[in-house]
Amino acid sequence: MSGLTADLDAVAAAGGYDDTDAMVEEAVRELLRRRPELRLSLAVEKYQSGAVSLNRAAELAGVSVEAFKDELADRGIDRDAGFLTDAQRDDHLQTFME
């Protein structure tokens, strides 16, 4: 067990958490609450990867959909980011149908 893992386990136990995952989840939530720019970047990344919709990404970022669209434009990210091309969609559909 690494030193970091042991420390995380000790902090989780001392803090009354059920497990290390619960403690890390709370720590990440607090980090994102304190650093809105990181929260926005996370939402952009999730949107760009296709993990969330535009509306959900804006919600995660804590901004309006219009403000999120502006942020994407400011970062030079196409609104099609994260979506499949027609060819990719056809490939996925073909694989699914087999």
Image (spheres, grey):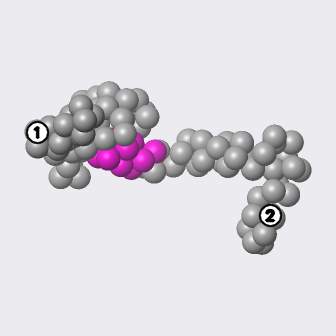
User: Is residue 53 depicted above or below 91 in this figure?
Assistant: above
Helix or strand or loop: what does disc 1 sit on? helix
User: Badge 1, how many Cα within 10 Å: few under 14, some, many 20+?
Assistant: few
Which residue is at the front of the view, 93 or 78? 93
Q: Which residue is mark 1?
A: 86
| Rendered residue at 23%/52% (across/down) | 75
The residues tagged by marks 1 and 2 sit, at their Cα atoms, a distance apart of 48 Å
**Residue at image point 75% right, 50% down:** 20
Q: Is residue 67 magenta?
A: no
Which region shows up in magenta? 39-49
Camera sees residue 79: no
Amino acid type at mark 2:
Asp
Helix, strand or loop for the magenta stretch, by majority = helix
Residue 18 figure quarter:
top right
The amino acid type, in three-letter code, at marker 1 is Asp
Query: Residue 41 location, x and y as percent?
Result: 39, 49
Relative placement, left or right, of 35 versus 58 is right
Placement of the C terminus among the 4 image quadrants: top left
75 left or right of 31 in image: left
User: Vertically, is 17 above or below 10?
Assistant: above
Q: Nearer the viewer, residue 81 or 33?
A: 81
What residue is shown with label 2?
Answer: 7
